[in-house]
Image (cartoon, rainbow, N blue to C red):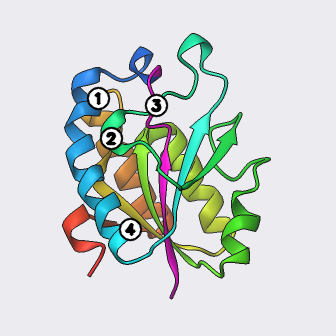
Amino acid sequence: MKQALLIIDMINGMEQWISKRRIRKIIPNLEKLIKKCKEKKIPIYYIVHKPLGKKGTKFYSKIAPKRDKIIYKNYYSSFYRTGLHRALKNKRIKNLLITGISTHWCVLATALSAYYRNYKITIVKDCVTAPTDADNRWALHWMDDTLGVSIKNSRYVIK
């Protein structure tokens, strides 16, 4: 089954909602996952919430897109009024690895939208974050319990 990596809102400016410490904690895991995906030729989609004020879409340097697809969104879900579903459908992608900020809003909304579009969903647990551990745990639990998504650490999602 073809898969893709979604990287949600990993851009400067998100520190107004989530601490730099929490964001920095997931970057090394995401960096390794991106490398694995590139080695396996798994498409990577960067999803960007716009506009985010003066800082705009400056990506964290260690995980910035190279030749990857960037999709802009105005809402929490990466699917709502974007071309993401069409892009994935055109590549016959059915399995999504979802990462990024913030587990309890944008990651959750994207997972819910993907669920309604019949994607197989894996939330990469060590590549998502929220303002607090409680927010993160709650969102992961809700997605597992309600949507039945797979929740795995990055080292287990790409073979």
User: Closer to the camera: disc 4 or disc 2?
Assistant: 4
Q: Is residue 74 left or right of residue 125?
A: right
Crowd rating for badge 3 (residues with CA inside 10 Å; few <14, some 14–19, many 20+): many
Number of dots carrying numbers: 4
Query: Hey, what amino acid is under mark 4?
Result: Lys
Residue under numbered circle 3: 11
Of pointers 4 and 2, the one earlier in the residue sequence: 4
Residue 103, relative to residue 88: is it above or below? above
Residue 119 in the image, given as x and y percentages of width and height: 59, 74
Query: Hey, what amino acid is under mark 2?
Result: Asn
Of pointers 3 and 1, the one earlier in the residue sequence: 3
Residue 42 in the image, given as x and y percentages of width and height: 45, 73
Q: Which residue sits at x=58%, y=52%?
A: 110
Q: Quadrant of the C terminus?
A: bottom left
Residue under numbered circle 2: 136
Residue under numbered circle 4: 38
Query: Hey, what amino acid is under mark 1?
Result: Thr
Label 4 to label 3: alpha-carbon separation: 20 Å
- In depth, the one of 8 and 60 nearer the eye is 60
Asked whether the beta carbons under mark 2 and mark 1 sit within 8 Å of each other, the answer is yes
SS for callout 1: loop
Crowd rating for badge 2 (residues with CA inside 10 Å; few <14, some 14–19, many 20+): some
- In depth, the one of 62 and 49 nearer the eye is 62
Residue under numbered circle 1: 132
Crowd rating for badge 4 (residues with CA inside 10 Å; few <14, some 14–19, many 20+): few
SS for callout 4: helix
Q: Is residue 133 left or right of residue 48?
A: left
Of pointers 4 and 3, the one earlier in the residue sequence: 3
Label 2 to label 3: alpha-carbon separation: 19 Å
Q: Which numbered tag is attached to residue 48?
A: none
